[in-house]
Amino acid sequence: MNAIRALRSALTLGVLLALPAAAQAQFPNIGGLIKGAQNVKKLGDSFRKIGEEEEIKIGGDLASVILGTAPLLADPGKQRYVNRLGRWLALHSDRPDLPWKFGVLNTTDVNAFSMPGGYVLITRGMLDRMRSEAELAGVLAHEIAHVARKDHLNALQNGMRDSALGGFTEYVGGGSGGLGAAFKTALINAGKTMFIRGLDKDDEYDADRMGVVIAARSGYSPYGLVGVLQTLSATPDEKGFALMNKTHPLPVDRIDRLDRAMGTRLDAVSPVVEDLPSFGQMRAARATPAAPAQPVRRRPRRKS
Ligand SMILES: [Zn+2]
């Protein structure tokens, strides 16, 4: 089974593997950070008035869901580059103080994900499609906009309306009790459904608009995202685009909306960056060979 199919079937079947230890070390779950009395809130009510630390914890657990479907790319250079660009963009969002974390997933599927609290993951397949730093900035800024707008958090809260919310306090308190564990299970299931179905179309259009603003504020060409959408619309049936297409409005519709929203207003933004040498260097560096599509037949283990 190749990486694309593995990701897709893991997402569609909900067969999620345990988070590899190495990935966890690089992208730590911040579960243990939240403690104590400030989290003792009214049950049920509490999930609606979620605090920032609680949001970060939820985001960390959802990041584990995505990382369970595809590991992080073992290429520190690319991870550093995407983190640097992502954090620069996030500084120009409405939530610059979140502990933003960006990562590249080792899959040829073309997609990007964001999670509450500042977690953003982009696939190697998407990174390879980028023709300039402005395009990458456009994609990351769209994801940053989802976090700033709390789109996933709101979708989760809607999706979990009927779930047992009684365990929220235990969950955020980091206890391993039954209620907290039950809440976490419900959260993970709601998260899987959300990643498979996607957000509301209007959330996507709004994130496009806000993303363009974030990219422009950060000095990048506001047309970076449009360039990516043109790439996506040029070959809509490509296998790697399947989940992206399923969870987002059609690229042509997104371009059309952006075009109407932007008009000529952003033409005056100057100076803008289309590209920087760092992008070419990142692309040129082939530090890591692609992971084999299929596990090689295992050699029989030697007895020691
Ligand atoms: Zn989106």
Image (cartoon, rainbow, N blue to C red):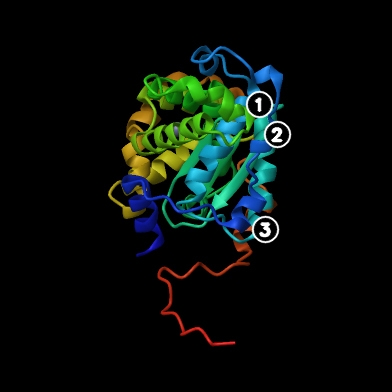
SS state under label 2: helix
Q: Nearer the viewer, mark 3 or mark 2?
A: 2
Is residue 219 or residue 87 the one in the foreground?
87
**Residue 144: x and y, percent?**
57, 31
Q: Mark 1 vs ligand 1: CB under 8 Å?
A: no
Within-10-Å neighbours for mark 1: few <14, some 14–19, many 20+: some
Is residue 205 or residue 74 the one in the foreground?
74
Residue 97 is left or right of residue 118, and the answer is right
Q: Is residue 39 something that shows in the picture?
A: yes
Q: Is residue 93 something that shows in the picture?
A: no
Question: Which residue is under mark 3?
Answer: 76
Image quarter of the C terminus: bottom right
Quarter where residue 244 is shown = top left
Q: Mark 3 vs ligand 1: CB under 8 Å?
A: no
Q: Which of marks 2 and 3 precedes in the sequence?
A: 2
Q: How many marks?
A: 3
Q: Nearer the viewer, mark 1 or mark 3?
A: 1
Q: Which of marks 3 and 1 precedes in the sequence?
A: 1
Callout 2, which amino acid? Leu
User: Marks 2 and 1: in contact by CB < 8 Å?
Assistant: yes
Callout 3, which amino acid? Pro
Label 3 vs label 2: CA separation? 26 Å
User: Marks 3 and 1: in contact by CB < 8 Å?
Assistant: no
The label shown at residue 90 is none
The label shown at residue 33 is 2
SS state under label 1: helix
